[in-house]
Structures are given as structure tokens and as C-alpha cells.
Image (cartoon, rainbow, N blue to C red):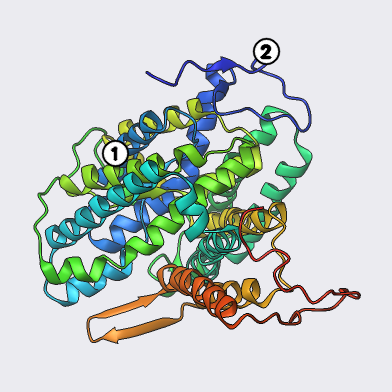
Amino acid sequence: MAGFGWKLHGDGRHLNPGEVVRPGERLTWGRTVALGAQHVVSMIGACFVAPVLMGLDPSLALMASGVATVLFLVMTRGRIPSYLGSSLSFVGVSAVIAGQGGNAGTLTGAMLVVGAALAGCGLVIHILGARVIHAVLPPVVTGAVVMLIGFNLAPVTASVYWPQDQWTALATMLFTGLALVVLRGFWSRIAIFLGLVFGYALSWILDRTAGMIHSANGAGKVTDHWRLDFSGVEKAHWIGLPTFHAPNFSASAILVALPVLVALVAENAGHVKAVGEMTGDPLEDKMGMAIVADGTATVLSTAVGGPATTTYAENIGVMAATRVYSTAAYSAAAAFAVLFGLCPKFGAVVAAIPGGVLGGITVILYGMIGLLGAQIWIRNGVDFTVPLNLIPAAAGIIIAIGGVSLKFTEHFELSGIALGTLIVLTGYHCLRWLSRAAGQRRMPLLDAGTSGYDGSADRNDGQAP
């Protein structure tokens, strides 16, 4: 496979403090497979949640994510360690389409068109070069987009997972944090997975010692229930095919879905830049192809009835924690996903992971994702005493995190990541043009500690240095 042939990192077993495993390297295959399993565990909750919320088959989504990841790795020649899972960007769109009388086929048809448009945008970027991204998405914008993508996930933890079992969530969070900081070598690399195992075991013990818990369940209803519910596992078959269906196309549904394209381009660009920052490998030459790959994977998935795909922020968090960027681990994860997509019983076991456990894990993971945006700002020297940088980023992040919505018509509105991204992107470029047209320089808004300020408001206006 072009671009592959991983080189063994050292002896494949021991890593010194501060060492990283680069995309073209790997640990021993046993350790690589274990890391691949951790990537599956970290993404599988969102990969299942997205299709369930949209009325699609989660087993098909899991299988499609594995195929999409392999396609992505091949098209980017193994340079970008990323996992492509089910996109949550279309959950709101699916509700609107359902309200218009559309069905699952209508939704997948609309997502297929958006996927094709995304691939087209990536092709333009690939041909014209990364300067298109630098011009449209400078560091201040991409940092804000990465940050709002991560922090936008916070309400999922706070309102869905954590309330199901707050004490297990707290214990899992503390154990995972301790494992990340205290453990060394390979064990520190699989700390996220160890945290999930710890939380799973703790929930099993509490069920047998403390009995049922009175709290919100997965549906948000407060009731007495077991932390671990294996009823679905007992009923599920060991082997089974997912449910396929053909897409159909509706102009109104496509118009509702197309605005998500703005967020997807920014999300992919932000993801690639974040991975480039983490690995120390400039990926500008692969940015366009990465977007093409995501769009192509979305077309492939939706053509058989699956959800749209996207590069998964959850797995960025795992890489940040483990410092293992090997694409071999992602190949192993993809193989697991395809196999597990054919095993309904495995899906049931994953679905049985208690919400409290996911709450403890996602507090750390989602926070790591958001703070990668801050890392982009720091490494590019973005100056937030400059109003041009401060205002769009501040507004977009608050809009995305707070779940602000903007209703255009009875059947079309933007909110969350899509609206926050749009505010950051258009706000920055509009204000940049207006400030230059006016020919004015302004004093900084945040001037604490900036004595001796020379009046130059454009020390770093967010463009790449």
C-alpha cells in the first residue's frame, strides 16, 4: 500500500519520556493492535450516538467508519493519523428533514450531496495549494474552530453522561488523569482505555454492592436503574449484517444540509492543522487531499445508507494523551471497526458502557481537544490584544459552546459548531477588510500587562507568521 511500510520505533516496546511515535512508525504489533482498540473505544460512543440520533443503523455506521478510515489513510498516503467516524454535524439537519416529512433515504441523499461538494472543495484546495487555506483560515480562525469543536462537546458530558452516575464519573476521571500522569511507557499510552475498563468494573461492583442507582438514564429520564444493563447483549446475535438502504434526493433537504459544508471544511482544516502541530510534520500539501478523502468517504458511506463521516476529534484527544501518532494503530482500529460492525453482540457490549463512565472519560478528552486550539494560537503567536483577532474568536466560541441558534426561515436555522464557525470565519474577514479600508489602528482591548504598547494593532493579525 503506497505510503505505508511502518518502521519499528526503537525496540517497539520502550519509550523514553518525551518520545513520540511518528505516523510512519509503529510499536510491536501487539502494542499497535492494543492502541488501535483504544482508538475504537474512544470514538465508538459518538460513532454509535450519531446514527442513532439520525435514525440510521449504528452497526452500518461502525463498519462504514472502518472502510472510510482506510480510504482516508490511503488517499493521504499514511501521513495524517486520523479516524473517520460518524459526523454529528448533521444531527440538527436530520431533525429538520424529518419535520419536512423526509425519511432516512432523504437524509442520506442530502448528506451524499454535501459529501460530493466537500470533495470538490478539497480538490480546489489541492490544486491551488494550501495558500487558499492560509488566506481563508489563518491561525486565529483555525485555533478558534478547533477550540469550539472541542468545547462544543462539553454539554454532552454535562447533560447526558455525567448525571447518569456522578460519582462513577468523578472516580473514572480521577483514575484516568492519574494514569495519564503517573504511568510510564506503554501503560501511559493506553490510559484512556484503562480508564474505561476501570469505570466499567467499578459500575459492575457498585451494582452488586449498592444496588440500583436513582438518576437519569440514557434517555434523560430520572428513574431507578442498573448502571450496567446487559439485556441487549443477551439478545444480540454474534454475527449479522447491518441494514443497507439507497439514498434519494430532495432539493429542499439538500438546501437544508448544504450550510454544514462551511463547518466541515473548517473542521477538516482545523483537524489537519492540529495533527500537524502535534506531529511536527507540516501537512499543508496534504490538506486538500484530506478534505477530498473525507468527502469521498462520506459519499461512499451515504450511498449505502450510512451517515456522513468526519475526522474524529475524540481520537485527537487520544493522540494528545498517548503521543503515539502511528497510522498503523489507525489501520488496526479500522479493521476492528469493520469486524465489530459485523458483530451485533459487540455493539451491544459497547452500548452497555455506563453513561457515568463516558462522563469521566469525555471530561478529559473533550477538554484536550479544545485546548489544542489554544496551542495553535500560542505556536503561531496570535495576539489577542488586537481587536481583529479577539472579537470574532470570542463571539464564535461563545455561540458554539452556548448552543446559540440563528433562525432564517421556519425550516432552516444554524446553530452550534456550524454557526460558531461561520461567525469566526466571516467575522474575521469582514472586520479585517473594514479595518484596512478605514486605514485606522486601534489601541488594544486587553491591554493589561502591555505597557509600552506602540499603537500597532496589527502586530499579528492572525495570519500565519
Alpha carbons under labels 1 and 2: distance apart: 33 Å
Residue 131 lies, with reference to residue 18, above or below; the image says: below
Tell me residue 57's x, y (percent): 23, 51
- Whether residue 361 can be seen here: yes
Tell me residue 63's x, y (percent): 29, 38
Question: What residue is shown at x 18% (from left), y 71% (from top)?
Answer: 98
Residue type at mark 2? Answer: Asp
Question: What residue is shown at x 47% (from left), y 46% (from top)?
Answer: 130
Dot 1 or dot 2, earlier in sequence = 2
Q: Would you say 289 lies left or right of 117 here?
A: right
Residue type at mark 1? Answer: Met
Residue 12 lies, with reference to residue 304, above or below; the image says: above
Q: Would you say 281 lies left or right of 88 here?
A: right
Question: What residue is shown at x 11% (from left), y 49% (from top)?
Answer: 245
Identify the disc placed on residue 63. 1
Between marks 1 and 2 in the image, the one whose residue lies nearer the viewer: 2
Label 2 neighbourhood size at 10 Å, few (<14), some (14-19), many (20+)?
A: few
Identify the disc placed on residue 360. none
Of residue 401 and residue 158, the one placed in the foreground of this image is 401
Secondary structure beneath label 2:
loop
Residue 79 lies, with reference to residue 171, above or below; the image says: above
Of residue 214 and residue 184, the one placed in the foreground of this image is 184
Picture quarter containing residue 260? bottom left
Label 1 neighbourhood size at 10 Å, few (<14), some (14-19), many (20+)?
A: many
Q: Would you say 107 lies left or right of 59 here?
A: left
Tell me residue 102's x, y (percent): 12, 69
Q: Which residue is mark 2?
A: 11
